[in-house]
Image: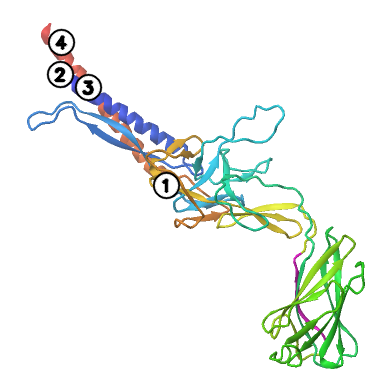
Amino acid sequence: MSIFGAMDTSVSGMQAQSSAFTNISDNIANSQTTGYKGVDTNFINYLVQSTPTSNGADSVIAHPDYTNTVQGTVTQSADPLALAISGQGYFNVSEPTANTSTTSTAQTFQSQQYYTRAGDFSLNKQGYLVNGAGAYLNAWPIDTTTGVVNTSSLAPIQISQSTTPPVATSSVTLSAALPTTPATSPVTTQVDVYDALGNMQPLNLSWSQSGTADTWNLAVTSPNATTSPIATASMTFGPGGTVASAASGTLSSLSTSTAGASASANTSGGPATLTLPADFGSGSQPIALDLGTFAGTAGLTQYAGTSLNLQGATQNGTPPGNFSNLSIDTQGNVTVNYSNGFSQAVAQVPLATFAAPDALQNQSGQLYTASQGSGAATVNAVGSNGNTLVTGSTESSNVDIATQFTNLITAQQAYTANSKVITTAQQLLQTVVNMVQ
């Protein structure tokens, strides 16, 4: 029986080495596959009998040893939307379902959640971020009005490539210094704003001194405004105004008598804002003119000079814009950029982590599903588990070809040796048969 046992043991050895060959061939074949994780082989001995005086025929089986936690090399990609994970974690992705509807072209997805390290994402014709294996990237949506990330909703990202509507200017911030020397004529500057239709409209700001060097009148006009001037205001600099504690050259009072206009309360350290009742033919468009703070040195001041010194002027309106491109930052924020310079964050890519990632169940296309051994996924923002995103890059396969060739030679030798045992056992059995004859 020991000869037959030896043959059985050698057969199990050949089967185990065949499994090792399969794993090695998979690794070599996928050595250039983005996000692929190699599979090593563990050999396990099974005993039939083992005592101090007797050792029965044993057997060996091969179990796969997954290397999901071994980082592949991060390499730069020509694709700006490509993503690589440095550290632990997986992208949350979905697999599409076949669309059998004859009336709807909307893409639907399987209910099964998948995970991957293959981050070679790009936009498809429907506006989804899809990797090279066809998996759709999932993300948390961002409320474009409030900027709040909805972490309770994880779904495939679909980017609208439509034209963004114009944004009417509602706020203008001005930083300038009026002259201290007497001005015989008004000093002026211009700020371009946008109306509700996206047309650029010039706001002309004209200051003239009123009686004393530190008291000024402001007139705001625009050639396309329905009223002219849009508003007028009076202001004082230094301790002579309402805010007596104001230092020389800083704004101490602001007031307006224009119907529909308003000025903020004259309070030391408080905001100095003049609200303009603008109308460029598309309806009322209030514009808050931010002049800094009362008694503050930022915003509108009056310092030495003979002319207006404009230091900066910004406004929050935009014209209509066409879709330009998509960008993803290292925090996973997905931002849509338009031709008018407007940008808007629409989603945030989180990462899934597992208690035992090597126990994830392999699926086709470098995908994984959670298993009882891996535990359920924990989905968090990038960086919460020490991981980071590398943009414009992908993670290469973690397979080392030199190691695989060494394993291949070892497995070949072991397989041949097991077959030699079987051949020898057959010869021994033939000797027994010859003895009986």
- Of labels 4 and 3, earlier in sequence is 3
Please provide percent x and percent y for residue 175. Answer: 74, 79
Q: Nearer the viewer, mark 4 or mark 3?
A: 3
Across and down, in percent, residue 172 comes to: 77, 71
Residue at screen point 92% across, 73% down: 228
Task: Tell me the CA gap for discs 2 and 3.
Answer: 10 Å
Marks 3 and 1, Cα distance to the nearest angstrom?
43 Å
Residue at the disc numbered 2: 1
Q: Which residue is disc 4 drawn over?
A: 433
Q: Name the residue under label 1.
A: 354
Secondary element at tag 1: loop
- Please determine whether, in this image, residue 298 is positioned above or below residue 368: below
Task: Name the amino acid, label 1.
Answer: Phe
Q: How far apart are marks 1 and 4 (CA)?
A: 59 Å
Residue at numbered disc 3: 7
Q: Residues within 10 Å of mark 1 (few under 14, many from 20)?
A: some
Magenta residues span 306-316
* Tag 4 near tag 3, CB within 8 Å: no
The tag earlier along the polypeptide, 2 or 4, is 2
Look at label 2 and name its amino acid.
Met
Which mark sits nearer the N-terminus, 1 or 4?
1
- Label 3 amino acid? Met
Q: State which quarter of the image contains the N terminus.
A: top left
**Front-lying residue, 123 or 266:** 266
Q: Does the magenta stretch include residue 309?
A: yes
- Badge nearest the viewer, 2 or 1: 1
Image quarter (top left, top right, bottom left or bottom right) of the C terminus: top left
- First in residue order: circle 2 vs circle 3: 2
Q: Which of 177 and 45 is in front in this view?
A: 177
